[in-house]
Amino acid sequence: MTSDTVRAAPRTPPGTVPEPTPPPPLRRRLGDLPVAVLFVLPAAIGFALFYLWPAVRGAYLSLTRYNVLTPPRFIGLENYEKLFGDRLFWNALKVTAEYVVLNIVSQTVISMLLAVLLYRLTKSMVVRGIVLLPYLVANVVVALVWFWMLDFQLGVVNNVIEWLGFDRVAFFGSDLAIPTIAGINTWRHMGYTALLIFAGLQMIPPSVYEAAAIDGASEWRTFWRVTLPLLRPVMALVMVLSVIGSFQVFDTIAVTTSGGPINATRVIYFYIYDLAFNRFNFGYAAALSSVLFVLLAGIAYVQLRLSRAGESDLRGS
Amino acid sequence: MARVRWGRVAGWAVLVLVMLVTLFPFYWMLRTSFSNTRALAAGAADLLPVDFTLGAYRRVLGLSSTAEAVAEGGSSGTVNFWLYLRNSIVVATITTAGQVFFGALAAYAFARLRWPGRNAVFTLFVTALMVPPIFTTLPNFVLIKELGLLNTFLGIVLPHLLMTPFAVFFLRQFFLGINAGVEEAARIDGAGHVRTFFRIVLPMSRGPIATLAILTYITSWNDYFWPLLVGKAENVRVLTVALGIFRSQTPQGSPDWAGLMAATLFAALPIMALFAVLGRRVIDSIGYTGVK
């Protein structure tokens, strides 16, 4: 259901919204306009000021040189041209992509496993509550706890590793920092994602499992041939949301590595932040945000296309 | 049959392992917060607090003198925990109240009132769901700065106070599902739209409104990026921002881990308390974020 609503919403052509009340015959052309204005006005102001205007302005600022203190100066596409030759930009893209892939793969696999286990083994709210817990605390909190646990000298993980007879691991060194941060965020999100998938599992009618059982299909086979295909719409939605969220990683990096060592964790979001607020290069930062915007829109589009998210296999069966 | 049972045992083993991995960092936070930072090196892997002390909490709550703090490996800088807690509460509460209330008003107009341009405006609103926050964040920062609202509560809450596409979308979806008969009966009795909304629709929507409020409160409480940009000043600094700053105030190379963990635990505590009280409601609410 969730997948349908999300996909359908922005595309709803005018007129398909269900009309709850049949038009009272005496109503005038304007309908409830005066009351409606009253009801929508606060939200409309919020939308205009903090969504619409900044979107327009962001696009404009990306065509300017702007340091916030003096008025923006129009420079055309210079910022975008500069992007192509910016080593740090390509590095940021590479690092972000690496993070997204690691994070999404580990998170999806673990969450799927966890969701199936929850579905098959227990209805306990306590168990579900426990797996959800990390998602409820702030990114900053999660980042700090793991930063402490993975500390090279004093962290418990490294002390256990040494006790087991191995060498200590520099989790936040340049080689491992991105996988480490991907792992930390997997830890935070796995329960949450599992619950989303779990909700999808609950929507599969028991009759299809009964049919599979009658056909003598093994559990393994049932999972691959029945469960997974039926989960596709939910998985598509979960994947799109996770990928988009994953691209915007910032908090964890800001409180642990701050983009370092050197540029090993300077992801796009952090680079934009750095450009705008440490180097006061707002125009260039805005250009980068525009590129990120287009990139995310493109990825979401391709994902939804590839996964045919809106179609459910249930209808056909 | 036996095979299936073994499968269950293996399944439970994995599930218990996942729960342990989930809970251990929380325990470690607690364990470290009761330790003496200076003694941590000696017992880095001890399961119990090292050299048990309440010093970290005293430091975080501003109860210990500089000399005491330094003796236990803390910094001389004080953490104004109560102030940051108050700020977090103020920001999360105002954001939640505004967003839910104004979101409900707009959602009602989109779901129930008939007016020209309704669908077009709604489509426009929902399109904003697709825009990644960073794209609007930089210009919003500029706007808040121009309005002279940097380092004010208003500046921190304003962008999410009047509307978020999610809130409007979510509540409209619910209002559409309410049986229109009840409202019509009220209208026939002579109640206007405003009255119908406050007397009938709002009370009927307690459930979804609570769901939205919980989600908004948690999101707002945990937000870091925006308050970092516009609210670094001490008097409006929220807990997440304060934690980041506390972490970077490292005395002589090694952070005050016990103090940091005590502060971290405090920052997480209100949400965990909310979770403990509302339990099931929070878990059920999470399912709705799928539409976010």
Image (cartoon, rainbow, N blue to C red):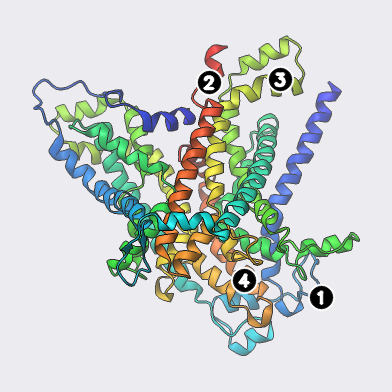
Q: Which residue is disc 2 drawn over?
A: A312
Q: Are marks 2 and 1 on the same chain?
A: no
State the separation of the CA atoms marked 4 and 3.
Answer: 48 Å
Mark 4 / mark 1, whichever is N-terminal: 1
Residue drawn 47% across the image and 31% down it: A2
Residue B260: numbered disc = 4
Pair 3/1: label in front: 3
Tags 2 and 1 in contact by the CB under 8 Å rule? Answer: no
Amino acid type at circle 3 is: Thr
Residue B252: x %, y % from top left: 67, 83
State the separation of the CA atoms marked 3 and 2.
Answer: 18 Å
Count of number-bearing discs: 4
Q: Which residue is disc 3 drawn over?
A: A222
The reply to whether residue A138 is in sight is no
* Residue B136 in the figure: left or right of residue B112: right
Q: Are marks 4 and 2 on the same chain?
A: no
Specify few, some or many for label 2: CA neighbours under 10 Å numbering under 14, 14-19, or 20 or more: some
Residue drawn 54% across the image and 64% down it: B267
Amino acid type at circle 1 is: Ala
Q: Are marks 4 and 1 on the same chain?
A: yes
Tags 4 and 2 in contact by the CB under 8 Å rule? Answer: no
Q: Which residue is disc 1 drawn over?
A: B42
